[in-house]
Image (cartoon, rainbow, N blue to C red):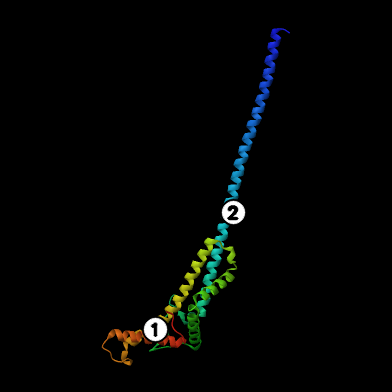
Amino acid sequence: MATSTQRALTRLIRKEASSAATTDDLQGLLLQVVFALLMIFMIAYFIFVEQQKKVRAEEVMALNRQKLTLAIEKVAEARRVRYGINALLVQGVDGKRVFDPDTIVVGSSISLAPAAKSAFAQGGQQAFADYGDRPATAAAWRTEVFAEADVQPSALNEEETAWFETALATEIENVRLDVRGVQRALAARLQRQWISDSSAFDDTADPRTLAERIKQKSLQAVATEIGSEVLP
């Protein structure tokens, strides 16, 4: 075989080998690109799924809080009725119902219609009994609120549970302060009446002693009205 022919065959063989090598390299490169794109897609997908889970969990948390907040308010309002507070409310000038001790204290005594008198007395006794046993009262509120909200305690995570317990304790205390405020507002109104006319009290040279006696007498008048001690 001529030398020139050998060189031509050698070049042809090298060219074919080079073409084959180039094709393999391209295929390998394409596989790497596809694999990289697939990895990016998978990572993006898992991030999306986790974000969706987080959004869903936040939505459920927000819904639970909304339902529980409304339930706490509803149970609190029922407790105010139970403690006789609403029976003492009157229509205000702005259309809202308000508590006005001036409409209840007549002369030097508390004057209520029979139904309101009964509700106030029974409510005062119930309030004193309930707030005398705080753990039992909190447990009763908790049961009522979850039932009203139609939410299971086990559905709350640690953060939600902490929020709920704080919100519940705050509202229980708010109702106690409402009851106490009504009782002591009546006592204060009686004190004002008696201070303006202290002739029923023994003369004393010590104004502080007289003021204390009037204060205790007014609290006792409210306690007598409800048949129980006023809330401390």
Q: Amino acid at mark 2?
A: Lys
- Return the residue nearer the eye: 18 or 149: 18
Is residue 84 visible from the viewing direction of this image? no
**Percent of width and height locating residue 35:** 63, 37
| Total count of labels | 2
Measure how far apart labels 1 and 2 are at the Cα level.
56 Å
Q: Amino acid at mark 1?
A: Ala
Residue 206 lies, in percent from the top left, at 27, 86
Q: Earlier in the sequence, mark 1 or mark 2?
A: 2
Which quadrant is the N terminus positioned in?
A: top right
Residue 185's spot in the image, x, y percent? 40, 80
Q: Which residue is mark 2?
A: 53
**Proximity of marks 1 and 2: CB atoms separated by less than 8 Å:** no
Residue ID at (59%, 64%): 154
List x then y, in percent, for residue 97: 46, 77
For this orientation, the residue located farthest to the right is 1
SS for dot 2: helix
Q: Does 199 sit left or right of 20 as displayed?
A: left
> In the picture, residue 44 is in which quadrant?
top right
Between residue 81 and residue 146, name the one nearer to us: 146
On screen, residue 78 versus residue 7, left or right, reads: left
Task: Note whether 55 is above or below 207 in the view shown.
Answer: above
> With 121 as the anchor, is 37 left or right in this view?
right
Q: Residue at x 43, y 81 (%)?
A: 183
Packing grade of label 1 (10 A; few <14, some 14-19, many >=20) is many
Q: Quadrant of residue 17?
A: top right
Disc 1 target residue: 187
Is residue 195 shown to the viewer in this render? Answer: yes
Q: In terms of secondary structure, where does tag 1 sit?
A: helix
